Amino acid sequence: MIELEMHTVQSAPEDSRKLLQSSIDNFGWIPNQSAYMAESPALLSSYQYAHDRFSDCSLSDEEKAVVWITTGLLNQCRYTVQAHRWIALKQGVAADTLTQLETNPDSLPEKLRAIHRFTQVVVKAQGIIPQPAAMDFLRAGYTRQNMLDIILGVSQKTMSTLLNSLAGTQIEPEFMNVS
């Protein structure tokens, strides 16, 4: 396995230092994922920018959690799943919803099931989203903006799941403390 360096604010390239400090300000620590990303200021900056934009998008916190966790599950990234479960619970998303998403997504409420299914299509698309899948998503009551926001969320999580796969990122104990 390729060994990537887990950076601190002090060891990181200059252009990553403020970004890592931002992680400390947001979480109280530097998440392992960000510590690895810091090796590439462009990746860390792009990831944080995409995260901020997706956090402010047209989807609810619950819907964003479905996008993030579905992407993590499909990309086989336990780090993403666990970190976003922790974040979702902090935002007030019901633990039962998150458990359903991981264990029996077909039992989700119809609208969340539509988000889950469309996210699956986007993750698996390899650049081509089938028109029928897009139309099904719109018929479920979502908008074109919601559709494009999901593309943003999947893009953001793809950056991190690829990095976590390469680095073998370990899940912090903080992210394991979820109800």
Image (tube, helix red, strand yellow):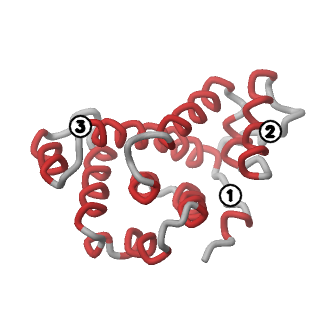
Is any atom of residue 71 visible in this view? no
Per the model, the C-alpha gap separating discs 3 and 1 is 36 Å
Residue matched to label 1:
170
Label 3 vs 1, first from the N-terminus: 3
Relative to 55, is 60 on the left or the right?
A: left
Residue matched to label 3:
144
The extreme right residue here reads 10
**Residues tagged 3 and 2 counted as in contact (Cβ below 8 A):** no
Mark toward the viewer: 3 or 1: 3
Relative to 135, is 106 on the left or the right?
A: right
Residue matched to label 2:
7
Helix, strand or loop under label 1: loop
In the rendered image, residue 118, in percent from the top left (x then y), is placed at 26, 50
Is 152 located above or below residue 111 in the figure?
A: above
**Residues tagged 1 and 2 counted as in contact (Cβ below 8 A):** no
Residue at image coords 57%, 63%:
82
Label 1 vs 2, first from the N-terminus: 2
Helix, strand or loop under label 3: helix
Is 69 located above or below residue 55 in the figure?
A: below
